[in-house]
């Protein structure tokens, strides 16, 4: 019987309702019930249990998962809580199935973000230790110096987060624009790095996540191709879905 039990956050992820991280927030807010009772974090359920979120019964209706690449406009928020934020990504896309974003891209930024109803792949991609590349094009408010490029690529101390950013690839594209490839996802990382060097970000656009490139107009989405999905699975094949302790202080994963 124990083998048939699974944590409630994992169940909500596997049936395509939301990611485990979002499920934990719903449970903590008391919006989830199991057989009419609000569960504690980490509660396990059996196949016969009835789960509701906000009073609506949740069941596994997935016949196949959805994987989308979306070019997010500036001003859209990467949240699935449509009751809190009116300019949210879910209402903007209006996809016929319930989907959720993989990671985040802050409101003033634009560019590529992936969405899916496959909670398992979300957990693999979001792990900071997996070193998955994300590429950005950034425009700043004053001319870019060689010192700026060298310091950005070598690591910037972020005192409020008690972190030094990982070494990364930075390339000057024009007087005011540069390309940066991160394998780390601290909150507002690029903006904080620039601020430390007394530069202000004017525009920030994500153009690639691992092997997925942004090739659609702003505000539009497309499904991943079979080749993209095959390569994506190869890249995350060694990714851990569960957290493993690290002797080095772990980085927080946010976009």
Image (spheres, helix red, strand yellow):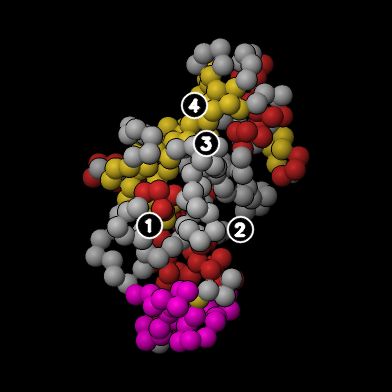
Which disc, if any, is residue 56? none
- Dot placed on the residue nearer the N-terminal end, 2 or 4: 4
Question: Which callout, 2 or 3, points at the residue further toward the start of the chain?
Answer: 3
Q: Residue at x 31, y 60 (%)?
A: 97
Looking at the rendered structure, which numbered label has been put on residue 137? Answer: 4
Which one is in front, 8 or 222?
Answer: 222
Q: Earlier in the sequence, mark 1 or mark 3?
A: 1
Measure the C-alpha gap from mark 4 to mark 1.
27 Å
- State which mark lies toward you, 2 or 3: 3
Return the mark for residue 109: 3
- Residue 49 shown in magenta: yes
Which label's residue is closer to the chain start, 1 or 2?
1
- In the picture of the structure, the residue carrying the numbered disc 2 is 245
The Cα–Cα distance between marks 2 and 4, rounded to whole angstroms, is: 33 Å
- Residue interval drawn in magenta: 33-59
Q: Position of residue 80 (x, y in %)?
A: 47, 57
Q: Could you say where residue 247 lies in the image, as x and y percent from the top left?
A: 66, 52
Residue under numbered circle 1: 99
């Amino acid at each position: 019987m124990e083998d048939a039990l699974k944590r409630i956050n994992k169940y909500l992820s596997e049936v395509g309702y939301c990611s485990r991280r979002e499920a934990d927030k719903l449970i903590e807010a008391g919006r989830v019930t199991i057989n009419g009772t609000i569960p504690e974090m980490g509660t396990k359920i059996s196949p016969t249990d009835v789960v509701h979120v906000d009073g609506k019964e949740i069941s596994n209706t997935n016949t196949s998962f959805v994987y989308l690449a979306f070019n997010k406009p500036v001003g859209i928020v990467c949240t699935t809580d449509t009751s809190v934020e009116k300019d949210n990504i879910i209402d903007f896309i209006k996809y016929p199935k319930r989907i959720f974003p993989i990671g985040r891209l802050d409101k003033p930024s634009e560019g590529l973000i992936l969405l899916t109803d496959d909670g398992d792949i979300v957990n693999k991609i979001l792990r900071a230790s997996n070193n998955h590349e994300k590429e950005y094009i950034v425009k700043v408010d004053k001319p870019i110096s060689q010192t700026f490029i060298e310091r950005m690529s070598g690591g910037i101390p972020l005192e409020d987060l008690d972190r030094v950013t990982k070494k990364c690839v930075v390339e000057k594209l024009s007087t005011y624009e540069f390309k940066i490839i991160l394998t780390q996802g601290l909150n507002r990382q690029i903006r904080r790095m620039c601020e430390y060097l007394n530069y202000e970000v004017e525009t920030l656009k994500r153009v690639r996540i691992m092997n997925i490139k942004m090739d659609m107009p702003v505000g539009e989405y497309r499904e991943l191709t079979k080749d993209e999905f095959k390569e994506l699975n190869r890249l995350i094949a060694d990714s851990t879905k569960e957290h493993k302790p690290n002797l080095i202080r772990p980085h927080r994963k946010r976009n």
